[in-house]
């Protein structure tokens, strides 16, 4: 049996990302471990409260030898454009969630709008990752 466990987003600053995902989005820390033997590598994951089996890995862009300078520059450029990764979040009330997150300081790039599949909106995290917030209509 295969299950979904984690998705990864590249982030510029893990502490900044941690604050955004926990303080503004209301997620909780799953794992925050720094491994000195791996040059201070930090494995940082967060996830939605009430979904302990799902997490988002907030991964710092690695340097050499994992990622060369040219690749790092390409990833940073894609992040700046919002194309390095997307997370889809679900909600029972997109308008209420939009209001609450806006009050917490989340800046939306798309306000909630009716779509054929539900009510959809989007925002970006501090690293530029695109986050969709959707209230999906029930499956028929």
Image (cartoon, rainbow, N blue to C red):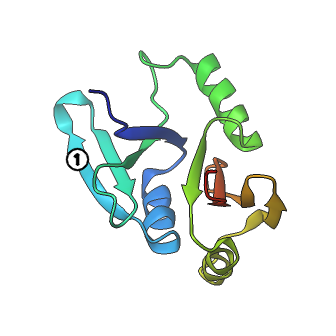
For image coordinates 57% across by 47% down, the residue present is 87
**Residue at x-position 43% and y-position 60%:** 18
Q: Nearest the camera: 91 or 40?
A: 91
Relative placement, left or right, of 95 versus 89 is right
- Position above or below: 80 against 16: above
Out of 117 and 28, give the one closest to the viewer. 117
Q: Is residue 101 left or right of residue 29?
A: right
Kindly indicate the quadrant of the structure image that contains residue 36: top left
Residue 32 sits above or below residue 83 on the image? below
Residue at numbered disc 1: 33
**Residue 14 or 28: which is nearer the viewer?**
28
Q: Is residue 122 above or below residue 84?
A: below
Is the N terminus in the top left, top right, bottom left or bottom right quadrant? top left
* Residue 114 % position (x, y): 82, 63
Q: Position of residue 45 (x, y in %)?
A: 35, 49
Describe the element under mark 1 as helix, strand or loop.
Answer: strand
Residue 34 position by quadrant: top left
Residue 69 coordinates in the image, percent (x, y): 58, 20
For this orientation, the residue located farthest to the front is 140
Residue 85, above or below 29: above
Q: Residues within 10 Å of mark 1 (few under 14, many from 20)?
A: few
Identity of the residue drawn at 46% across and 26% down: 63
- Count every numbered label the image shows and give the total: 1
Q: Position of residue 98 (x, y in %)?
A: 67, 74
Residue at figure coordinates x 61%, y 51% from the top left: 139
């Amino acid at each position: 049996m295969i299950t979904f466990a984690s998705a990864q987003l590249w982030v510029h600053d893990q502490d900044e990302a941690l604050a955004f995902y926990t303080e503004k989005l209301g997620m909780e820390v799953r794992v925050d471990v720094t491994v000195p033997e791996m040059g201070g590598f930090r494995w940082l994951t967060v996830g939605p409260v009430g979904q302990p089996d799902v997490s988002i890995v907030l991964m710092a862009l690695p340097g050499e030898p994992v990622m060369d300078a040219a690749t790092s520059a390409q990833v940073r450029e894609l992040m700046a454009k919002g194309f390095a990764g997307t997370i889809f979040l679900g909600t029972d009330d997109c308008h209420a969630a939009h209001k609450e997150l806006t009050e917490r300081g989340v800046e939306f790039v798309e306000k909630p709008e009716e779509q054929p599949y539900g009510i959809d909106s989007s925002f970006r995290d501090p690293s530029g990752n695109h986050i969709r917030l959707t209230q999906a209509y029930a499956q028929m």
